[in-house]
Amino acid sequence: MNLFDSLAVALTALRANLLRSILTTLGIIIGVGSVIVMVAVGAGARSEVDRRINALGTNMLVVFPGSTRVGGRAGGAGTSLPLAEGDVQAIRERLPEVVAISGYLQGIAPVVRGSGNWVTGVAGVHEAYTEVRDWSLAAGRPFTAQDVRTGARVALLGSTVAEKLFGREDPLDETIRIRNVPFKVVGVLEPKGQTGFGRDQDDMILLPLSAARGRIVGRNQVVNDQVGQIFVKLEASTDLERAQEEIESILRQRRRIQPGAEDDFAVRNLAEFLKARTAAQTTLSWLLGATSAIALIVGGIGIMNIMLVSVTERTREIGLRMAVGGRRRDILMQFLVEAVTLCMLGGLIGVAIGIALAVGIAHTAEWPILISPDVVLVALAAAAGTGIFFGFFPARRAALLNPIEALRSE
Amino acid sequence: MNALSELRAAAAGAVRPPLIEATAVTKTYRMGDAEVHALDGVSLAIRQGEFVAIMGPSGSGKSTMMNLIGALDVPTSGSLEIDGRNVAELTSDELAELRNRSIGFVFQQFNLLPRTTALRQVMLPLLYARPRPADPEAIARQRLEQVKLATRLDHLPSQLSGGQQQRVAVARALVNNPKVLLADEPTGALDTRTSEEIMRLFCDLNAAGITVILVTHEHDIAAHARRRISFRDGRIVEDTGAEKARSAAP
């Protein structure tokens, strides 16, 4: 009796008790289905975080002004001395690992182009900003050092803004008015998608910091060369933690903060922050994975139970098979194949349901999912393994039946 | 010329060892504290081509004898050779192989598999055969034709009459060209007319050279056999004998 014969026998037997087979395999269906959903959602979340970290810019530190670490009597964010051009200068000069550095002074402003208008985020930046953020251009050119030095009235549009204001037209060399100041569009940025916090990063316009400052953004200025936040891109081999301390000490010195006093600024590694959030999600998906494993075990016990019933019901058949020459291992194999077939059918149904659910979640909750073939294979292997493990005992019981008694049974 | 060749055949038969040879076979079951001697020193020899009826009331040991002859069980003591092999020395796998190759079973309750077509029923022993025949389906079809069921190949047991079911079972028993057809009350579940039909089939098969061993308690069924062995209390009480049966035959 080869495997193919056994499979044919197994399918006949399972079809004979179709409803029972399906109910039995429900545990496996649920187990495998939930594994697929959990892993798809977990992997989707991870890849999304990776994407966001990359979108944020790699090896990047951000310096925020005036956010004290502990609330207390501190004035809160932005109440302290702003960061200024001098700070940018100092970090660039004293930290050799700096690849690119840029200020980021942002605000919200109405933008008009002909009869169309749009209120969007506007940020004044240095020419290196696009490099810091690993942000390439879909069209046009980035800012030059001269643009920033001379305060040229040029603008780079985020893809959302470009679409809102220009539709399908080419925005290059067109003029837009921001707070009534005309700017010439010199480039359009590649779409970057949402931030890790759900904000559309493409709904914004970049201007040279010198051109935007005072007129467009940061109008209630305390110092006249403020730069908002500072984005620092460091060499790939840089120890970010050390660089972070370095920047802190540079700024403490420049801001004359007494030893022991709190910083009135903060240096953040946003990628780390996102990674920490991923870790929490990973823990959660492990927990759900464990739940799936329990479902598989419960399903397996169900399989074992029904296989024992099947062996009892078919004792005569087993006796007959032995009488016509079936060896013990033939009988064992037949029932093992039947248990594995049952589990694999459950596994396949589970995979189908799991994928359908994952896609459904992706659509309704707009949650990214990732279904990898590996996971499907592993889930099916787990189902097959469950079949072998829990099918073995009933199959062995069948194989060890005494042929005479088996033939005589009712 | 004819007499001479018959003489030669008889001489050859005498030289050839019996197909089934039991010597002082006992079979003891333990039921609780008591020992039950189902067989108590049975010796018999059955040669190729015989048509034997094993008779006796229930509890006489005839079923136990049938299980032993069918290689489904091994004796407690004594020796039993089937088709040249001492069953006491065989593993359970080797016993299965012996059953597969040398013995065809026919049961009172037919023992057909449910939800399985006649063709597949008959193929079953071939699927367990090693080496496996190249085209089991063709062999099975041929056997079904032999029992005049060529038009019922795809029928399920539930779609066949009792007599037809038993004929499927006979075809299944024959499919591996066994040395012995071992039938346990093969007509017990059939009406008189169908019983006659099945018995005629056995007679034809025996005439074609197959050894047939019938286990029955019905005298008119046993009458078809050329040799009768009667059991009582685990012993043989009557054996009409191979030679006598042979001479009695027309």
Image (cartoon, grey):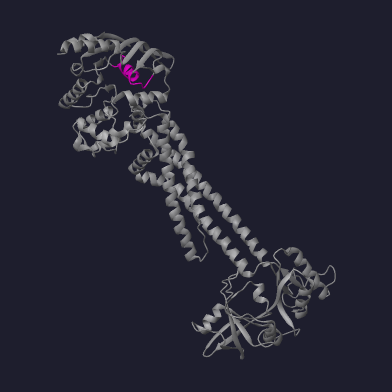
Quadrant of the image for the C terminus of chain A?
A: top left
Using the rendered view, name the quadrant where residue A197 is placed: bottom right
| Residue A136 coordinates in the image, percent (x, y) | 60, 74
> Viewed as shown, does residue A252 lie left or right of B52?
right
- Residue A262 appears anywhere in the view: no
In the image, residue B113 sits, relative to residue A67, either above or below, namely above
Quadrant of the image for the N terminus of chain A?
A: top left
| Residue B71 is one of the magenta-drawn residues | yes
| Residue B248 coordinates in the image, percent (x, y) | 17, 10
Please report the residue visible at 64 percent of the width from the left and 75 percent of the height from the top.
A130
| Residue B199 is one of the magenta-drawn residues | no
In the image, residue A283 sits, relative to residue A75, either above or below, namely above
Please report the residue visible at 59 percent of the width from the left and 58 percent of the height from the top.
A281
Number of marks drawn:
0
- Residue B219 appears anywhere in the view: yes
Which residue sits furthest front? B1
| Front-lying residue, B14 or B231 | B14
| Residue B49 coordinates in the image, percent (x, y) | 24, 17
> Viewed as shown, does residue B207 lie left or right of B47?
left
> Viewed as shown, does residue A249 lie left or right of A347?
right
Which residue sits furthest right? A259
Give the magenta range.
B58-73
| Residue A216 coordinates in the image, percent (x, y) | 65, 86
Using the rendered view, name the quadrant where residue A72 is placed: bottom right
